[in-house]
Amino acid sequence: MAELLDPVARGGKSAMPRRRGRFGDGLAVLSGARPDVLEAVPGARAKFVALGGVLLSTGGLAVLSAAFAVHMALGVWWPLALLVGVGWGFVIVNLDRMLLVGMAHDASLKRNLLMAVPRVGLALVLGIVISTPLTLQIFHKEIDTEIVSLQAEASDAYNESLDADARFAGLPELREKVATQQAVVASGGSSAADLAPLQGGVAAAQAAYDAALSTQRELSAKAQCELDGTCGTGDAGTGEAYAQARAAADAQRDVVDAAKADLDAAVTAVAAGASRSMAQAAADLETDTAELARLTQQQTALQEAFDETNADNTGILIRLQALSALSDSTATMAVAHYMLALLFICIELLPVLMKMLLNFGPRSTYDRLTELRDDGDLEVEQLQQSARVEVEQAVQELLIMAEKERVDRQKEQVLARRRARLAAAVAQRESGEVPAPRTESSAEESGRRMWDTGPIIGLAREAASRTVRTMRRRPDVREVETV
């Protein structure tokens, strides 16, 4: 009872169904329905409302997909990315609506298939485009981890490419050369490679000296043994055997002195060569160290620049590579990836598939009434066009008749003036009077334009316009609202 007495309560309860009705009408129009036909066939409204809801669903997915894609690819601020996503969603809804509206019901299965195949193909492409950013966003944690590995691999590959670069091809040899020069300087030049022959000569001279010295010691020991009588002949004293042994020992001492001289000469040559090598190595070391520092710094700068760019490479392309790598390495990830992408693609294909299935079915009352309305509109337009043609023909005939009457009247006037002039001339000749000159009024009458229709054509056009304005469309024809 209180609700009946309270108009606010009554208004509040009735406003909600009205809003729902307006929203449903909007969804029906969005799916391509004609409001004038739905008023006559309300049973078809639910089908078109459901189809419009599916279009809104695809539009919502497109909004999210575009927002994620713009944010991932360009790093755009989220509110601006959502604004771009709304624009993309509007485009997708408009395309899907175009696909639906263009698929009119046809009794021919072949024509239905010809209309459906390109639309399904376009919807499939749109579904793949929309589903990709959503799939990347759902698996973003796994993808971020894989991106780190891909970036490390890219950094290593770039480092290897720098080593193979022609600009840095001699860098390893230059490093070895600098290390060798540093070792030569540190050793005082003794580790120089060009001293190897001289060092070989020192070794040979040392060996010869050691051999000669050993022989001399043996001969000296033998002479001493002969002197003591402990070996040799066994006779102590400076006998013949001792004299020979001593002479041999003294001769060997000359050999030792010669070997020592050769050894000293070899050592002196090695020292001189080492000094020269150290000076040369010190001079080359400064130049080679500067070149090595320059090339190393250039290579390091290139590597650091690449690493910086590589660290910022978190866009859609590397995410797709990471997702593909994860799918290749893990079967579970591959199944989840493809099933999720297939789900989004099916949602995008759903409006076109529904419309295609409806077209394959029998014609509904809505389809028949739509065709009947279209035929009626065509007939009305044809009748109006025919009437306009007939009116124009009548106007032209009336103008022609009016022009003929005007010409006939002008002919009669000309003939009458000629007869009057002839009669006046005859009368003047008979009376002997001189003919008077022609007045300006007579000249103007004779010089009037032959095609001056005067007020007759104006009256004819006014009558024709009144005839056209009296035409009205049949009251039983409803105008079709263009959505």
Image (cartoon, grey):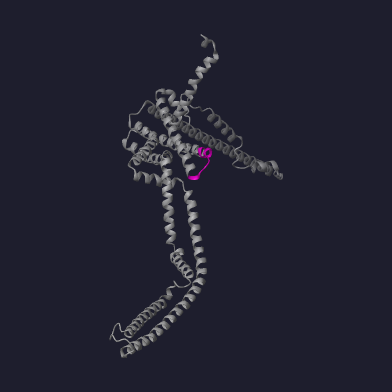
How many marks the image carries: the answer is: 0
Q: Does 115 sit above or below residue 248?
A: above
The part of the chain drawn in magenta is: 73-82
The answer to whether one can see residue 136 in this image is no
Q: Please give left or right for residue 478 compared with residue 425 in the image.
A: left
Q: Identify which residue, 111 or 404, lies in the foreground.
A: 111
Q: Please give left or right for residue 111 compared with residue 442 in the image.
A: left
> Does the magenta-highlighted stretch encompass residue 81?
yes
User: x, y percentage for residue 244?
Assistant: 32, 89
Q: Main secondary structure of the magenta part?
A: helix
Q: Identify which residue, 217 or 75, lies in the foreground.
A: 217
User: x, y percentage for residue 169?
Assistant: 44, 65
The answer to whether one can see residue 422 in this image is yes
Q: Identify which residue, 210 or 156, lies in the foreground.
A: 210
User: x, y percentage for residue 119?
Assistant: 38, 39
Q: Quadrant of residue 115?
A: top left
Residue furthest to the left? 233
> Does the magenta-highlighted stretch encompass residue 113?
no
Q: Does 472 sit above or below residue 95?
A: above
Residue furthest to the front? 236
Residue furthest to the top? 1
Q: Please give left or right for residue 170 compared with residue 245 in the image.
A: right
Q: Residue at x 32, y 37 (%)?
A: 110
Q: Please give left or right for residue 215 compared with residue 284 in the image.
A: left
User: x, y percentage for residue 49?
Assistant: 42, 27
Q: Does 308 sit above or below residue 62?
A: below
Q: Identify which residue, 249 or 286, lies in the foreground.
A: 249
